[in-house]
Amino acid sequence: MTDTPALPDVNREWHLLSRPVGWPKPEDFALVEAPMPAPGEGQVLVRNLYVSVDPYMRGRMSAAKSYVAPFELGKVMQGGAVGEVVASNAEGISVGDHVLHFFGWREYAAVDAKNAVKVDPQAAPLSTYLGVLGMTGLTAYAGLLRTAAFKEGDVVFVSGAAGAVGSQVGQIAKLKGASRVIGSAGSDEKVKLLVEEYGFDAAFNYRTGPVSEQLRAAAPDGIDVYFDNVGGDHLEAAIGSLNRGGRIAVCGMISIYNNTEPAPGPRNLARLIQTRGRIEGFLVGDHYDLQPQFVQEVGPWVASGALKYRETVVEGIENNLEAFLGVLRGDNTGKMIVKL
């Protein structure tokens, strides 16, 4: 085993103490000091440099059965992270290598080498492997191109369009030949960003008026694809504007994640009969076969500046929880990342 000296004696990590009801509260969590992990056989010890906070993590804080196991009470939480290998007990990964893995919410992590993916900090900034070139980027790519079956000439509507996934969906649609791309966001500043920097044809602030009315004004001839990050009134509005043969890809429904009562469904589902439309949910984990194609196509767009991205970076593991709550509030523009 190869290692480096001068590691701290303790490892700070975030634990879930109780399952939040409604909006998560600080007392549901604790930043604790734990023993420094040591890599076992076939493992590497990683000093996390950047960790990801994402809306889906709210679901894992509940005990309800879902597509992934809930976080365990009294145990460290998980999430995407990228860091530097400081000790290795595995073939193929050396001290000094940088890896992407799924053991965030902590400063150091002992990771099975089979679950660590080497990344190149020379090819792209390390933080991008958590966003535009990582899971969020692949989510946008797979959801738009496979689930929503995007085709050239489509009119595309994206909710949560200034977020990490939504901003990439709109830009990929434009690069692939969409005839019109419309986005919704929660502030006038974000609306301006969508049009002026990301190249959306139109955008609106959903806080300033009914979504259905603003969408009809932005897409008077209807929409062919809706990429849903929000649910609620956005989904109902999209169904109301859907053209014949329209497709809706459901990625997330952040508007209902903290509800304590079931949210009412769209009242206009019968319109799918008239339009022959379809709604399909998806998880990025079902589409990892697209990863090589995704990197091959999107990587050059990012490198050339054809596909732009924003990151909201919060400093310090002590602020990890506040960064996560900020995602739920919509404080971030682009990918929310914590720099340790």
Image (cartoon, rainbow, N blue to C red):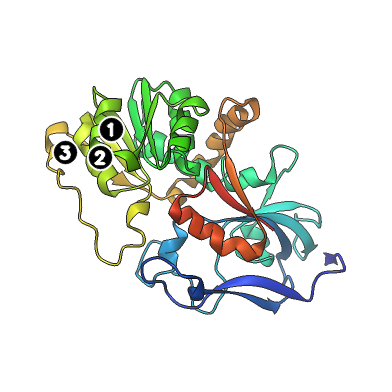
Q: Residue at x 52, y 59 (%)?
A: 324
Name the image quarter holding residue 220: top left
- Tell me how far mark 2 sits from mark 1, CA to CA: 6 Å
Q: Is residue 8 above or below residue 148?
A: below
Q: Which residue is mark 1?
A: 214
Q: Position of residue 230 (x, y in %)?
A: 35, 47
Type of amino acid at the residue the image marks with label 3 = Leu
Q: Is disc 2 placed on a helix, strand or loop?
A: loop
For marks 3 and 1, give the CA distance: 21 Å
Q: Is the residue under label 1 in contact with that under label 2 (CB below 8 Å)?
A: yes
Pair 3/1: label in front: 1
Mark 1 belongs to which amino acid?
Answer: Gln
Secondary element at tag 1: helix
Q: Which of 20 and 282 lies nearest the eye of the viewer?
A: 20
Does 296 sit left or right of 28 as displayed?
right
Residue 296 seen in render: yes
Q: Nearer the viewer, residue 206 or 134?
A: 206
Disc on the earlier residue, 3 or 1: 1
**Which quadrant of the figure has residue 51?**
bottom right
Asked if marks 3 and 2 touch (Cβ < 8 Å), the reply is no
Residue 212: x percent and y percent? Answer: 23, 37
Provide residue 75's location: percent of width, then percent of height. 55, 76
Residue at (39% x, 61% y) in the render: 67
